[in-house]
Amino acid sequence: MAAGLLKVYAPSSLVDLFKETEGEIQNTMANFGHIPYGQSMIGRLYFNASNPDGCQAGSNFTNDFSGDPDEVLSPIFLVEASGKCSFVTQTRNIAKAGGALALIIDQDNEDVSNVVLSDDGTGAGIRIPAMLINKIHGDILKKHLTTAGEKELKETLLKADFLVTMGINNNVDAELWYTSSDDKSLDFIRNMAEYYEPILG
């Protein structure tokens, strides 16, 4: 199972707006696209207010992104969720525009960890990851990107860690298959009885 840890890296004025969450932006990973498991990414964040959802093919996600990977490493494009197109379409358009990570702002004020950012059946071939982010956090980022000065915009960086999570507990689940007419199966069950503790609901 994949999980993404997304944090505001800079500038300090934006980090301060996320003090309550220690810089962390609530998110959920999409179940499509390429997820670079075990890796981290620090990238500059962009938002184009004249193209907030990026649903059109050939969308421009920023007015100043050069597309030169030597100049801008790991550009991260922010868009708003829209009924006009699917998450997959938004992510594919971001990938084609040179984005390294698609951040999609949820339409509703809700806990996005309970939301599935799902494939619409056309997600094959997308080579970047996508995350759905909490609307409140997304609106903070959007306001910053539409009001900050040029220097702060160039310094607006996020860090994404792509984790592999595994649920671990101290219980072992096992299924035993046996034949009731087999004496050895019955002996095994009798011998296991002293070790078996039924779970009482």
Image (cartoon, rainbow, N blue to C red):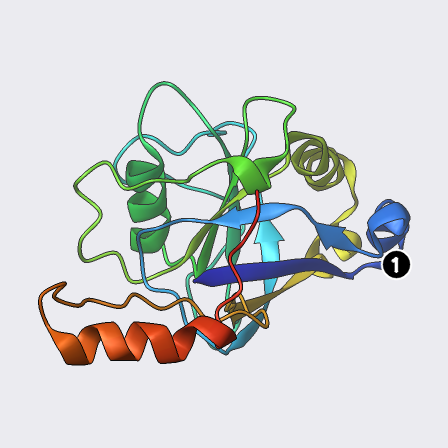
Q: For the image shown, how many numbered marks are present on the structure?
A: 1
Tell me if I can see residue 151 in this picture: yes
Residue 112 relative to residue 144: left or right: left
Residue occupying the point 17% across, 81% down: 184
Quarter residue 117 falls in: top left
Determine which quarter of the picture holds residue 60. Answer: top left
Q: Position of residue 111 (x, y in %)?
A: 63, 34
Q: Residue at x 37, y 80 (%)?
A: 191
Furthest residue toward top? 83
Q: Tell me if 98 is positioned left or right of 108 in this view.
A: left
In the depicted structure, whether residue 93 falls above or below residue 195: above
Q: Nearer the viewer, residue 187 or 95?
A: 187
- Residues 185 and 24: in front is 185
Q: Would residue 79 be found to the left or right of residue 13 on screen?
A: left
112 over 68 or under it: above or below? above
Q: Is residue 85 above or below residue 158?
A: above
The x and y percentages for residue 91 are 35, 45
In the visual, does 45 lie left or right of 63? right
Indicate the amino acid at tag 1: Ser
SS state under label 1: helix
Near mark 1 (Cα within 10 A), the count class, few <14, some 14-19 or many ≥20, is few
User: Which residue is pictured at 17% across the width and 68% down the height?
Assistant: 178
- In front of the other: 190 or 68: 190
Residue highlighted by disc 1: 12
Q: Is residue 94 above or below residue 105?
A: below
Q: Using the rendered image of the protein, determine whether residue 72 is visible from the camera's viewpoint.
A: no
State which quarter of the image contains the N terminus.
Answer: bottom left
State which quarter of the image contains the C terminus: top right
Question: At which x and y percent is residue 122?
Answer: 17, 42
